Amino acid sequence: MFDENECAVPTSTQLILQKTINEVVKKCTRKGPAKELNESRNGELGSMSAYIALKKKKQMIEVRDEGDSIEMHDTIVQQHNAEKGQETPQTSTAENQQEKKCRGPTRMFSVHTRNEEEKKVIDLNEFNQAVANDDKTLSEFSNFLGTLARQCVPLCCVNWHAYPHKEDLWTYVQEKYTISDEGKAWVLKTINDTWRCYKARIKKNHYKKFSTNEERIENRPLEIPKDEFELVMKYWGRKEVQAKAEKNTSNRKKVKDTHTVGPRSFAQIREKLQSKKPNKEKASKAEVFLVTRKRKAGRKYASLNDVTEYKIVSNL
């Protein structure tokens, strides 16, 4: 049974982390002067440094194994063709490399291995939302928070409010960026929102897509341990959870005036609108609404309904 006031962590995952943590933290160093990966909270079980280091090690092993597999395959093909007096097609390796060129999840190793001198400054607006002088810095910051959501908050944590390591997350963020304490609520909310979106993608692509749990386990993301995914499947399979999900889906479909700016921050958009004004006066909500609902010519969108048009016109 799932308790929404608890955040379950699979026992086997704990054992794996405990076994590898000391070794991984020692070996993970950044380019340039040797500097150990952050050992905040002494690398204790469940710390960000331990979890991220473990994920990095697993990725390196997967890439190495995949490369060895491709190389072995090409060697076998060459030997087989040589025995038959045939030439090996030169496109084999190229095709394999082309197949490998697919964008995976953002890792942000450059930020996770950042030292004190490399910290970037994140400013806050009047609402204590993160803004920056350039979009690139804020985009990097948002992506970094996304990696924390995916790598540090287990999928089997049913309720974000029950997640016990929020303070650790905030401390770790401050180790990589210069940001005042007033931004803590926004940072944690962003991690929460990103985590919820991540869970939604996993559910769509690896749970709803298949009809049996066997297929779901077989096609789960490689970075998610089997026992953790099994816990999540049990939760998603509960009748009351399915009923709640259907209700949320139905309510979401009723939203007509969705924005078109993708992952860009509304706070950053508002900041840029203000910076372009001669007297630097604040951008109104109506101006932000209008900018974030623009439609590109030639692209198909859901029709801009009368309610949305009224909202725009009445607030200008």
Image (cartoon, rainbow, N blue to C red):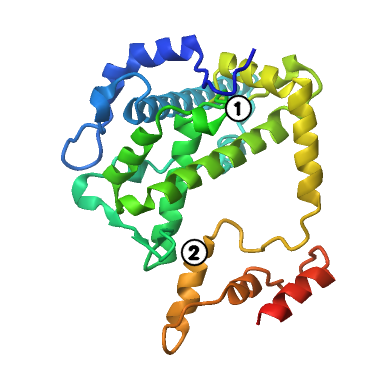
Left or right: 211 in relation to 283: right
Give the camera-side residue of 174 and 105: 174
The quarter of the displayed image where residue 87 is located: top right
> Which quadrant would the N terminus be assigned to in this image?
top right
Residue at mark 1 to residue at mark 2: CA–CA distance:
33 Å
The residue under label 1 is: 221
Any mark on residue 269, and which?
Answer: none
Q: Nearer the viewer, mark 1 or mark 2?
A: 2
Give the camera-side residue of 40 and 163: 163
Residue type, numbered disc 2:
Ala
Q: Secondary structure at mark 2?
A: helix
Bin the neighbour count of mark 2 within 10 Å (Cα to Cα): few under 14, some 14-19, many 20 and up. Answer: some
Left or right: 8 in relation to 220: left
Q: Is residue 41 visible?
A: yes
Bin the neighbour count of mark 1 within 10 Å (Cα to Cα): few under 14, some 14-19, many 20 and up. Answer: some
Any mark on residue 267, and which?
Answer: 2
Residue drawn where x is 34% and y is 33% of the image: 168
Left or right: 272 in relation to 260: left
Residue drawn where x is 46% and y is 39% of the image: 147
Q: Position of residue 234 (x, y in %)?
A: 69, 17
Residue drawn where x is 78% and y is 42% of the image: 249
Q: Position of residue 145 (x, y in %)?
A: 44, 44
Q: Position of residue 156 (x, y in %)?
A: 57, 23
Q: Contact, CB < 8 Å: mark 1 with mark 2? A: no
Q: Is residue 307 positioned above or below 66 on the image?
A: below
Of mark 1 and mark 2, the one earlier in the sequence is 1
Left or right: 275 in relation to 208: left
> Which quadrant would the C terminus be assigned to in this image?
bottom right
Q: Is residue 104 visible?
A: no
Q: Is residue 81 positioned above or below 246 on the image?
A: above
Q: Secondary structure at mark 1?
A: loop
